[in-house]
C-alpha cells in the first residue's frame, strides 16, 4: 500500500488518547513510507495527523470541498491540497487516490465516509482493505452493532469481515496488508444461517 486514506474527526475529542493515536498512526505511515490521504483540514484529529506526517517527512494529500472552508479550515502546508465542489467528489477522489482506508475516532462525517466505502466493498465495487483503529474502545458500540446486524441476518458474516479492526495501528496495518478480497453474494436468504 502506497497511500492510505484516514477518516477522522474535525474535532480532537475529550482525551489526549485520541490525539496521541493520530500521532502514533502518523509515525507508522511515515516509517512505512505510506502517503496520507485525508479530508484536508487543519483542525481536529484531521490536522493533528496531517501535521505529524509532515513533521516526520511524509507526504500528505488533502481533499476538501470549497464549501467547508469556514468550518474545517483548509491546511495550507500539505504536499498537495485538492479543492473540490462537493462531498461526493471528495469521497470519490479519496477512493481513487487510496490503496486502503483507516477510521480514527470522529463523528458523523467519519462514520459516513467509513460506511460508504464499506458499502462499496460489500457491493464489489472495490477490494481495498478498510480498517477501524479502535482507540480506547471508542468504536466498541459500532462493533457491537455490526455483530447484532450479522446475528439478525441483515449483514452476512463475510461482509462483516470487510471491516478490519484493532486497537494497535501496527497490527491493523498488518491485517490490511494480509486482506484478500473475495467476490461475495450480497443477499441473505431466509434459510441461510
Image: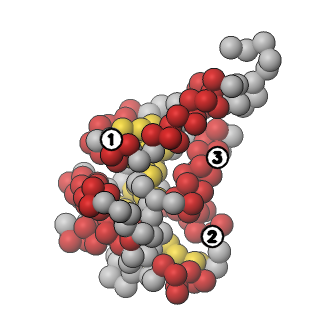
Q: Viewer-proximal residue, 134 or 25?
A: 134
The reply to whether the C-beta atoms of the residues labelled 2 and 3 are less than 8 Å apart is: no
- Looking at the image, residue 152 sits to the left or right of residue 73; the answer is right
Q: Nearer the viewer, residue 78 or 10?
A: 10
Mark carried by residue 167: 1
Helix, strand or loop at mark 3: helix
Nearer to us in this view, 86 or 42: 42
Residue 60 location in percent, x, y?
35, 69
Q: Distance from label 2 to label 1 (Cα)?
A: 29 Å
Q: Is residue 16 left or right of residue 179?
A: left
Disc 3: which residue: 120
Report helix, strand or loop for mark 2. helix
Tell which circle, 2 or 1, labels the residue nearer the N-terminal end.
2
Q: Which residue is at 41% across, 47% downward? A: 138
Residue at the (35%, 62%) spot, across then down: 14
Q: CA distance from mark 2 to mark 3?
A: 16 Å
Foreground of the two, 161 or 13: 13
Question: What residue sits right under mark 2 in the picture?
Answer: 87
Marks 1 and 3 sit apart, C-alpha to C-alpha, by 24 Å
| Residue 88 visible to an observer of this rendering | yes
Amino acid at each position: 500500500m502506497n497511500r492510505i486514506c484516514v477518516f477522522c474527526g474535525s474535532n480532537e475529542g475529550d482525551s489526549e488518547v485520541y490525539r496521541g493515536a493520530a500521532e502514533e498512526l502518523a509515525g507508522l505511515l511515515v516509517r512505512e513510507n505510506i502517503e496520507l490521504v485525508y479530508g484536508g483540514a487543519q483542525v481536529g484529529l484531521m490536522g493533528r495527523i496531517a501535521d505529524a506526517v509532515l513533521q516526520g517527512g511524509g507526504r500528505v494529500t488533502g481533499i476538501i470541498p470549497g464549501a467547508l472552508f469556514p468550518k474545517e479550515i483548509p491546511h495550507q502546508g500539505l504536499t498537495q491540497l485538492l479543492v473540490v465542489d462537493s462531498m461526493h467528489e471528495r469521497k470519490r477522489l479519496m477512493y481513487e487516490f487510496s490503496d486502503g482506508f483507516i477510521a480514527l475516532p470522529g463523528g458523523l462525517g467519519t462514520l459516513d465516509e467509513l460506511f460508504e466505502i464499506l458499502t462499496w466493498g460489500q457491493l464489489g465495487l472495490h477490494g481495498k482493505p478498510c480498517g477501524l483503529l479502535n482507540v480506547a474502545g471508542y468504536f466498541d458500540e459500532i462493533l457491537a452493532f455490526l455483530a447484532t446486524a450479522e446475528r439478525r441476518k441483515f449483514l452476512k458474516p463475510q461482509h462483516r469481515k470487510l471491516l478490519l479492526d484493532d486497537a494497535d495501528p501496527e497490527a491493523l496495518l498488518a491485517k490490511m496488508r494480509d486482506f484478500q478480497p473475495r467476490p461475495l453474494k450480497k443477499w441473505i436468504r431466509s434459510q441461510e444461517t
